[in-house]
Amino acid sequence: SINAAVTAALAALPGLVRTYYVDAINGVDTNDGQTRAAPLQTINKAFTLAGPGRYNNSTPTADYTLATSIAVPKSSNVLIMAHDFDLAANPNVRRKMTFLLSANTDPNIGAEWVMSGFRLAGTGTYSIDLVGIEIVLPSVPATGSLTSSNYNAVVSQNANFGPGFVAVQLRSCAITTPANPAGWVLGIVNSRAAALVINTVTYTAAQMAGHWISGLAAGSDPAASKRILTNLTTL
């Protein structure tokens, strides 16, 4: 009876790893997202269902546009990997993920425009791993100004309540940039630490210079920063 009670108690615990299929075209957020046949429509819903403190695996089966920022659950480990990506068999399979500028409605961060992204608004530690994703950055707006650079990134950070440490990895990704990109890969506040790892990523070096980590200028030596760990030799 004790064994049966322990088994039942363990079965009732929420799983540490949550995996969801996301189809921005055919998905529905009332689905459970557990199978390819019943995908969610938004990554937002996947984050909501997973909750904080878990390994959240989201599998986009179609191209995806982030119109606004998505709040990442507190102290989460997020993996977003393109459907059908396989390092050995299909290493070039990618899903396009487009980041946009939208009108800023938060008076606390000022300026007219803010870039969409995965927003880390809670304390703790986080990891974000993008695999088989084509990242499309927006252009600098023709008029008006952007908010602080830590808000305008693929992975962005709240200035007041952001995490003490975040690890970001891009694997088998591509970065598509306009001539004058508006955002960064990682937005981070100067008082916090981060790791940025780039593995087999294609990009235009001249356009990405100065757009890897907010606050670090083009040509910066990452080894000179005591709060950044990266395998990039120059930013």
Image (cartoon, rainbow, N blue to C red):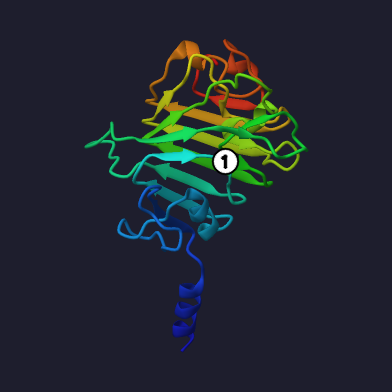
What x and y, as percent, mark residue 162?
69, 41
Q: Quadrant of the C terminus?
A: top right
Q: Amino acid at mark 1?
A: Thr
Viewer-side residue, 34 vs 3:
34
Residue at the bottom extreme, as displayed: 1
Residue at 41 percent across and 19 percent down: it is 203
Q: How many numbered discs sit on the rendered protein?
A: 1
> Residue 68 in the image: x percent, y percent?
57, 40
Write the residue at 44% across / 30% down: 135
Q: Position of residue 101 (x, y in %)?
A: 57, 31
Q: In which quadrant of the rendered view does residue 112 lie?
A: top right
Instruction: Return the residue nearer the eye: 138 or 36.
Output: 138
- Secondary structure at numbered mark 1: loop
Mark 1 crowdedness (10 Å alpha carbons): few <14, some 14-19, many ≥20: some
Q: Is residue 98 above or below residue 225?
A: below
- Outermost residue, left side: 89
Outermost residue, right side: 108
Name the residue located 67 percent from the left edge and 41 percent from the top edge: 163
Per the image, the residue denoted by label 1 is 68
**207 relative position to 23: left or right:** right
From this view, report whether residue 128 is shown above or below residue 209.
below
Picture quadrant where residue 151 is located: top right
**Rendered residue at 28%/33% (across/down):** 91
Extreme residue toward the front, this view: 143
Residue 67 higher or lower than 54, as above or below: above
Instruction: Indicate the position of residue 74 as horizontal and vertical percent values.
Output: 62, 51
